[in-house]
Image: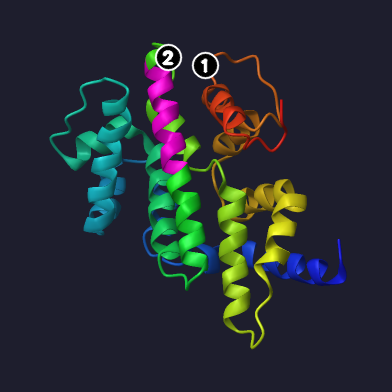
Amino acid sequence: MTDLEQQVFTQVRAIISNEEQVIGRRGILIPLKKAIIADGDIRNVIDIVSSDPALAAHLLWRSSSANHVAGYSTKNRSLKDALVRLGQVNIYRYAFTFYLKERLDELNEPYKKLVQAYWALTEAIAIEAVDNLHQMERYDISPDEVQTLALFSVFGEIIALTAFAYINIDRDRPYSLAVLKSLIESQQQTLTIEAFTSLGLDEELHDEFLIAHNLNQTHNLASPGLILRDILAKRKLLLCPL
């Protein structure tokens, strides 16, 4: 690693460690996480989600999308129906990705265009993963767990690019994208693991991510990570190639 790459790497890691700077809007996520950790009344979660109509609409859509692709009947009559079916862990994962995407849409060009391409990739992977789950007739694996995991497929690249964009905002002479490209290629695993740790995502998601990227192995045949691994291998996106 060159001195310049080391300098940028240090700055990127510093931003990744700042949850508020990366995710931006925290008004919903903080109380939502507390309500889920408390494992209390689902009505508390419903009240928190309902306070942001855009998030509520997004969760209703997500609640239907995974199972619709999987061939299940999932017409939710209410937000409560949707949230109960999703389960609290998936609610938080979907909410996190919703606010992350909202934050990414605020980036300046060319970073916005680049990160949106990564986001489109995750959505495509999610659709393919849930579709494969349906074709395999694996009713013992939650399509929402597969979909939420898939939405983090290239999480490290997305967070690193976002951090790089913030670094360049205040620079008269922005760092070249070539520097970031080199860092992602050489430090992708480190950046990804640090992003998971710093941003407070649940341990199960982290573990399944490692399985999906062939960094950990499992004997659990109902692992969502194993479903995703084949797709990432086919797309040559594994952090640890087969």
- Where on the picture, by quarter, is residue 144? top left
Residue at the spot of label 1: 222
- Where on the picture, by quarter, is residue 12? bottom right
Q: Relative to 230, does residue 105 appear above or below in the rendering?
A: below
Residue at the spot of label 2: 140
How packed mark 2 is, by other alpha carbons closer than 10 Å (few <14, some 14-19, many 20 or more), is few
**Which image quadrant: the C terminus?**
top right
How packed mark 1 is, by other alpha carbons closer than 10 Å (few <14, some 14-19, many 20 or more), is some
Residue 18 position, x and y percent, is 60, 66
Secondary structure of the residue carrying numbered label 1: loop
- Residue at the limit of the structure toward the top, as seen here: 137
* N-term-proximal mark, 2 vs 1: 2
125 part of magenta stretch: yes
Residue 231 horizontal side relative to residue 11, left or right: left
Residue 33 horizontal side relative to residue 217, left or right: left
Q: Relative to 192, does residue 107 appear above or below in the rendering?
A: below
**Which image quadrant: the N terminus?**
bottom right
Residue 198, visible in the rendered structure = yes
Residue 205 position, x and y percent, is 55, 37
Query: Where does the magenta region start and end?
Result: 122-134
- Residue at the limit of the structure toward the right, as seen here: 2
Q: Residue drawn at (38%, 24%), measured in percent from left and top? A: 131
Foreground pick, 128 / 59: 128
Q: Residue drawn at (41%, 66%), measured in percent from left and top? A: 25
Identity, as a three-letter code, of the amino acid under mark 1:
Ala
- Residue at the limit of the structure toward the left, as seen here: 77
Mark 2 and mark 1: Cα distance apart in space: 7 Å
Residue 164 horizontal side relative to residue 139, left or right: right
Residue 177 position, x and y percent, is 65, 67
Residue 18, visible in the rendered structure = no
